[in-house]
Image (cartoon, coloured by chain):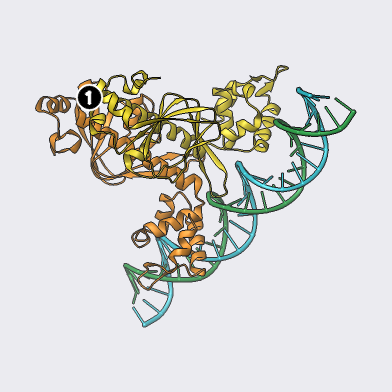
Chain colours: A yellow, B orange, C green, D cyan
DNA sequence: CGGTCGTTTGACTGGTATCAAGACGAGTGG
DNA sequence: CCACTCGTCTTGATACCAGTCAAACGACCG
């Protein structure tokens, strides 16, 4: 993979690309490796080129609060660079991952004034606000039950692909609570699991009313 | 106030300014008026020129979750414009307010490719991510007690300026809970209120340990 | 057929909101 | 100078949601 193949950089000229190449390193992480920890100062701009990275915060009781999963190609944690603050969350590889680390201090101002770059950055920041505001909505506004019901309506496939323990993890609840909610919805005849263990929605209207 | 006096626009040329002027209206709101509601589609880019605007979400039980207060000059709700989604929260005037509403659809692409504008937008979006990630930290990671202790350490003046009911409102808790926490901290001799009703911190170290 | 992993169920706990009542305190009118 | 009143603060009792702990249950795999 060459720099110019990365959409973010595709409109840079040769000198720009060479300059960035000089201050960048490509790192490989294996699943479970940490890209950065919450609270660390950022030295590099991180560009996810391959693999999946999850972002989470750790609460006072040591529990992970799952926020988002990033897939290529994404800027990760750029806010911390721009605002010169510590990373607000921890980023961990969930698969084998390739990340381009760009020495942020040595990134020339030209980089940001390039209209294509700044457009990409605006896009990336907007995406992040969307991620955070969804997260806030799901975690602070909705009850756990409403959150699960929303997941059922919007991503019922996930119940075929993942174990309940994993679904509990990404929805920031526990397997027990998830199980109780699903049991309740089955009793109400809003959903059922067919013989293939697929989740079938029986009463979409009633479900939808539960989170709106 | 002229457009060119607004930092966001200060580097635009005369034609640009005139173009924006044509598609903008200045609106005045009085305290309690709503600038936009959560869930509405955005038609205008909102620039707060004067006054204070608070941003909040409403939870399933009808309670307001206070997120932030904006002071001039701020872009408000621009994410919704950029991403063409509904406003993720409600914006309400808390004082008399002046807002410039710019017809977003008619804003020419040039506007965004102007390096100074895009830089301002990047700044504004970064600020918003910071606001949201602080909000998440305070509301989801910290306990109510830790959150109040943090407020005491970082903004003890607020206890002289505002009534406890108001402090409870902006910290998304109840007056009762706030009172219980303050009583506890007084009993522990971590804080006291002197004869002038000012909050005095007696044991900063112990307090700091409570939210870190 | 036993073991392991995942799910379900029940009992309990903790943290914070809610509801209700009482105490306080500053300003007001007699 | 007193006592009334209104708004605010405090305190107690209770409720609720979701997490925790523990145990039983079930399903699949070797």
Nearer to us in this view, B119 or B152: B119
Q: Is residue A112 left or right of residue B177?
A: left
Nearer to us in this view, B181 or A37: A37
Q: Given the current orientation, which residue lies at the most extreme front position?
A: A22
- Please indicate, yes or no, whether residue B91 appears anywhere in the rendered image: no
- Please indicate, yes or no, whether residue A158 appears anywhere in the rendered image: yes
Q: Tag 1: Cα neighbours inside 10 Å, few (<14), some, or many (≥20)? A: some
Nearer to us in this view, B72 or D2: B72
Q: Which secondary structure lies at badge 1?
A: helix
B181 in relation to B103, above or below: below
Where residue B41 appears, as percent x and y from the top left, is 36, 26
Where residue A185 appears, as percent x and y from the top left, is 66, 28
Q: Quadrant of residue B191?
A: bottom left
Nearer to us in this view, C7 or A76: A76
Identified at 53% across, 46% down, the residue is: A59
Identified at 43% across, 35% down, the residue is: A132
B104 in relation to B166, above or below: above
Residue under pointer 1: B113
Task: Tell me the chain of label 1.
Answer: B
Identified at 11% across, 24% down, the residue is: B15
Where residue A25 appears, as percent x and y from the top left, is 39, 31
Q: Given the current orientation, which residue lies at the most extreme left position?
A: B14
Q: Is residue A120 left or right of residue B135?
A: left
């Amino acid at each position: 993979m060459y720099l110019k193949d990365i959409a973010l950089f595709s409109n840079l000229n040769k000198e720009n690309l060479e300059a960035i190449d000089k201050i960048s390193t490509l790192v490989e992480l294996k699943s479970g490796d940490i890209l950065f920890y919450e609270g660390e100062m950022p030295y590099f701009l991180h560009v996810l080129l391959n693999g999946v990275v999850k972002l989470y915060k750790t609460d006072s009781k040591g529990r992970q609060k799952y926020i988002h999963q990033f897939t290529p190609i994404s800027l990760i944690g750029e806010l911390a660079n721009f605002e010169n603050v510590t990373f607000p969350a921890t980023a961990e590889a969930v698969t084998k991952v390739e990340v381009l680390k760009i020495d942020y201090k040595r990134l020339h101002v030209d980089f940001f004034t390039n209209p294509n770059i700044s457009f990409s950055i605006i896009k990336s920041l907007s995406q992040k606000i969307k991620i955070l505001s969804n997260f806030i909505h799901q975690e602070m506004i909705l009850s756990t039950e409403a959150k699960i019901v929303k997941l059922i309506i919007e991503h019922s496939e996930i119940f075929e692909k993942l174990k309940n323990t994993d679904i509990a993890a990404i929805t920031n609840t526990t397997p027990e609570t998830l199980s109780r909610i699903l049991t309740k919805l089955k009793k109400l005849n809003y959903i059922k699991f067919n013989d293939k263990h697929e989740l079938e929605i029986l009463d979409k209207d009633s479900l939808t009313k539960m989170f709106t």
